[in-house]
Amino acid sequence: MKLYTLTLNEARNLLQKKEITSTELTRAVLDRIRETDDGIGAYLTVTEEKALKAAEKADLRIAAGTAAPLTGIPLAVKDVLCTRGIRTTCGSKILENFIPPYNAMVIERILEEDGVILGKTNMDEFAMGSSNEHSAFKLCRNPWDRTRIPGGSSGGSAAAVAADMCIGALGTDTGGSIRQPASHCGVVGLKPTYGRVSRYGLVAFASSLDQIGPLAKSVPDAALLMNLIAGHDPRDSTSVPEPVPDYSGFLEEGLQGLRVGIPREYFEIQGLDPDVEKAVRGAIETIEKLGAVQVPVSLPNTKYVVAVYYVIAPCEASSNLARYDGVRYGFRNDSGAGLLPMYCSTRSKGFGPEVQRRIIIGTYSLSAGYYDAYYGKASQVRTLIREDFNNALKGCDAILAPVAPSPAFPIGEKTDDPLNMYLSDIFTLSANLAGIPGISVPCGFSGEGLPIGLQILGRHFDEGILLKIAYNYEKATDYSLKKPEISPGK
Ligand code: GLN
């Protein structure tokens, strides 16, 4: 048996029955990374030595009989999460050498359970992007077809899960960055309700939209990771003091009588790929056969979603990114001409073109005289989008939809056309604007053999219902079990 192919739940069972050790498992995954990642580019940093030490420590804990669910499990984390003593670049030159003095809350949780951190995964710079092509360091390729993007911005985490270069991973989702790469790489990805997981130590992109969540090989694996990371944290003022259920507990329930909403507007979008439509409609039928009842729903403000998001997210980003001035963090470009020229050249050389574009859009939209017309108006329409979901979810328990209009596109296809890239986020942005949870679960393949995901959206704090639907569907199909064929090397 190849240990790196194990799911998180399988690995957990074998570890706890002492049939394998965390050291064996961690070595197997590190070897896999060494053999495979040159041709993929999922990791920006691999912390081999630290990982092996953590595995040793986990083995002692398992031997002592005090193991927690994640003890000894090798995990990958997106390079936007602060890791004490480990470089955290955010995919940006401006943080190329930044070594955080503290851990993000989710990292603390992994370490408390003696989980094993393998390294930091590739991403679009500051999580801005849908293809991972905006990483300042290197491309990340889709393990199913290396000429294609893995999705973004958590492309590295999704590719690492798909190519068995970790047992599970964490990503972040501001407008789809967990769900869309999960869909493109054929893995499970869950964006929790806004406030469910602490953002403490997550490098901010758009603070009212950002959430951390799991990318996993199966739905039960995603549930276990949710158990680990969900919960209140006083260090994040938007973290909600709601009790955390046992997410694994939802998996055994059936779908009898559950009402699933089918949003009319989502299937009328121009450019919805026929293979995607077919796979998603097929998944809806399967879910109906499993006992759920379809109800038509309407999300009338869908046509404004891209415009609203691409005002609000850049506004928040321009404000959050003001802190990178060459004085306090990372990269500095100083010609000795004074403070202002130092700020300007640091920011022009440190940030890539997409980040600069967003800072300019955001600064413009927030400036006196434009604030009401852009940010103010976008915030009002955001409320309408949230109301669309509140209304739709009164008549159903969850909404079923595509994740992205097409399967993974070829590398380079949209890089010169930012608007086209933004439009590909149409189905994922609204969950962040509304603050609701969403999951992507594999639901088929395109004619060219590229994975397609089904998106399930739910009410605030109803992650359990999403996991239940996704798991019933996953059990009834075998899409999550399919793996890309990966030849070693470049
Ligand atoms: N693609 C979206 C953007 O570029 C979402 C990114 C994200 O979720 N981090 O803003």
Image: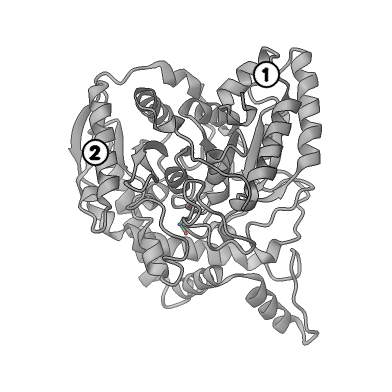
Quadrant containing the N terminus is top right
Pointer 1: what residue?
A: 15
Question: For the residue marked with disc 1, what is the amino acid?
Answer: Leu
Please name the residue shown 53% across and 50% down the image.
Answer: 155
133 to the left or right of 330: left
Please name the residue shown 76% across and 48% down the image.
Answer: 86
Relative to 228, residue 77 above or below: below
Please name the residue shown 53% across and 62% down the image.
Answer: 133
Q: Nearer the viewer, residue 163 or 426?
A: 163
Q: Which element carries disc 2, helix, strand or loop?
A: helix
User: How many numbered callouts?
Assistant: 2
Relative to 175, residue 340 above or below: below
Residue pushed farthest bottom?
Answer: 337
Q: Which x, y percent locates residue 142?
A: 50, 50
Q: Quadrant of residue 271?
A: bottom left
Q: Which x, y percent locates residue 382?
A: 35, 55
Which label sits on residue 281? 2
